[in-house]
Amino acid sequence: MTAGGDTSIPSARRVAVQTRKTKDYDVDPATLAIDWHHRAEQHGVDTTTVQQVVNVERATQQMSAQHHCADRIVLGEDSLANVLTASDATFDRRAVLRALAEHTPAGATVPELERRAEQFLASGQVEAVGVALTGVQYSTVELLAIETRLLDTAIARQHEGVGLSDATAVEGADGLSDQQAAMVTKLTTDGAGVSVVIGAAGPAKPTHSGSPAKRGNRTAIP
């Protein structure tokens, strides 16, 4: 560089690259590992020290992740019960896991979701009511109490003598088949406070379920 009269920094960089010793890529991995260990030991770093540092950091990360996951599950037991019974009277373990996951916007680990699901199913708010293809079926204690109260009320009102109508009022009614007319007659003459009609869904149901309301003091719910 001096002989050529060029002592600039760019020239120095070019000369450094041109004169640099070529790296030896044909190095045995085992030999390289021994050399690394030897260099680390010169600085007081051995395999045991490194492993201890790594294990402490990993345990800290796992504990932090567990706390974050617990905070991210936003559904409490009351809210979870309301979600599960919003449109169904029963639910299974899969439904609980699905509800928890859907209401955990920041995400959570599978073990954390399973722990919360088992905790909910073992709580005093839930009761097993049967077994289906998907496993044990559950319902909430609150919903079961409501159903029991409704059934008790219906049974108590069997002979209340309300909603009575003349049996001949149904004869010759337009649009009713013999079977439908018999059903309407039964509903308007048995005097029960609550009556249940079982039938297939269809356009005729509103017609004949509305007939008792027209012929007596009863409320028809299609």
Image (cartoon, rainbow, N blue to C red):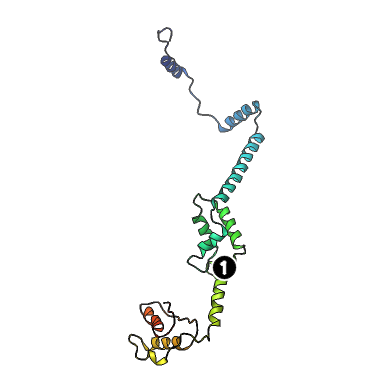
Q: Mark 1 = which residue?
A: 142
Q: Is residue 2 left or right of residue 156?
A: left
Residue 140 in percent (x, y) is at 56, 67
Q: Is residue 130 in sight in this rendering?
A: no
Q: Amino acid at mark 1?
A: Glu
Residue drawn at (41%, 79%), measured in percent from left and top?
A: 200
Residue drawn at (63%, 36%), measured in percent from left and top?
A: 53
Name the one closer to the observer, 204 or 142: 142
Q: Is residue 187 above or below residue 114?
A: below
Q: Is residue 128 left or right of residue 188?
A: right
Residue 144 in percent (x, y) is at 56, 71
Residue 98 in percent (x, y) is at 51, 59
Q: Residues within 10 Å of mark 1 (few under 14, many from 20)?
A: few
Name the one closer to the observer, 192 or 83: 192
Q: Residue furthest left?
A: 174
Q: Is residue 186 above or below residue 205?
A: below
Q: Is residue 110 above or below residue 213?
A: above
Residue 97 in percent (x, y) is at 53, 59
Name the quarter where the C terminus is drawn: bottom left
Q: Residue furthest bottom?
A: 168
